[in-house]
Amino acid sequence: MNPVRKKRLLIILAILAGVGIAVALALSALQQNINLFYTPTQIASGEAPQDTRIRAGGLVEVGSVKRSSDTLDTDFVVTDGAASVTIRYRGILPDLFREGQGIVAMGKVNADGVLIADQVLAKHDENYMPPEVMQALEQSAMKQKHDAATQGGAQ
Amino acid sequence: MSNLMNWTWFHKLGSPKWFYEISGRWLPWLSAAAALLLAVGLVWSLAFAPPDYQQGNSFRIIYIHVPAAFLAQSVYVMLAVAGVVGLVWKMKLADVAVQQAAPIGAWMTVIALVTGAIWGKPTWGTYWVWDARLTSMLILLFLYFGVIALGQAISNRDSAAKACAVLAIVGVINIPIIKYSVEWWNTLHQPATFSVIEKPAMPLEMWLPLLIMVLGFYCFFGAVLLLRMRLEVLKREARSSWAKAEVKTHVEKSL
């Protein structure tokens, strides 16, 4: 490569490195603002701002969903394994909402520590599976559990 | 000497006449491959691939969404590489490539954003959310608009090419941000499903049609890019004897 071209290439690389570092610094400074939601641990430790609308995200705890019999009110607990937040929502939940599913709820935390949500979004993971495969997986898991239970009973 | 030999193909690429000839030979093959792959991929993915256990049939939009998003990012990387070649080696063909590929990339980004929104409503419960993946993808669209606008707004061909190349190169920083946004930050968007190098997060009967669609999209992009570049090269070389002869044979053929 001749020296003129080499110089031009180096200038381009230098510009790219400079802009890259600037963007990296800006993004790391904005880290928390770019996160779409706060985890229950962050809310419990007071990292989330008070008295303002926030998003909380995590997994819906199994067995925590309580639906009101005469209104659309639903209460459920969202957890990240370490901490949990109770969420109250009035409205139609997305199709993918179920126990164990990842969700993001937006709303304000009230005095009792309950997040009154006005929007609930369902997250889904990157794994896709045909229904038959999932059934087979569930059956084998149930079978294992069943086997373990019967073995435990026999001992 | 061997070093010189290795670079001849690269310098040959700079010759518009040579490009026009060789691209004319590739074009039918690329177009045929694109048509075949897209036809097979669409029928397989929309009719025969199994539905998802959670999302049912609505997950099938992945077969358009993922290839379009792939292309949107690959085309931008290609813009940046062509921009470097144009700036460093002053290769005119690279300038042509930057300006002709940008609209295709912009359309791919639009397709990815629109299919994502349509997919988001039934699964997430919203068309749009300002999470890092969606926002960085929107920025990619604006970068494409910037490259297109700069190319159109500056009438001097060399200045326009330089401006487009610089924007394409600087904007490439957005590509790793798009790719890793789902890992660096809490997002609503899930991590990547489709990967060529890692074990895919879906069974083979779902992954194969997706692979075919991705390849089909790449071939489609290649064919459309060559078509656009050939037209632009012919326009720019309108005064040269080979271009005149080429146009003449085409006009005579159509008469």
Image (tube, coloured by chain):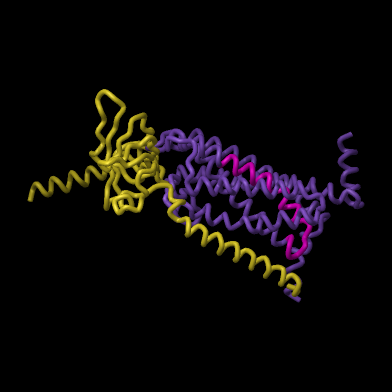
Chain colours: A yellow, B purple
- Residue B169 location, x and y as percent? 65, 58
Q: Taken as a whole, is the magenta stretch helix, strand or loop? A: helix
Give the residues in magenta.
Answer: B86-112
Image check: B134 left or right of A76? right
- Residue A103 location, x and y as percent? 36, 42
Residue B108 part of the magenta segment: yes
Q: Residue at x 31, y 40 (%)?
A: A115
Image check: B8 left or right of A22? right
- Quarter of the image where one finds residue A5: bottom right
Q: Residue at x 90, y 47 (%)?
A: B244
Q: How many marks?
A: 0
Residue B41 part of the magenta segment: no
Image check: A108 left or right of B167? left
Residue B24 visible to the viewer: no
- Residue A52 location, x and y as percent? 38, 43
The quadrant of the rendering that contains the N terminus of chain B is bottom right
The quadrant of the rendering that contains the C terminus of chain B is top right
Q: Residue at x 67, y 65 (%)?
A: A12
Residue A18 visible to the viewer: yes
- Who is closer to the viewer here, B12 or B70? B70
- Who is closer to the viewer here, B249 or B61? B61
- Quarter of the image where one finds residue B109: top right
Question: Can you name the residue that lies furthest to the left here?
Answer: A155
Q: Is residue B149 above or below residue A76?
A: below
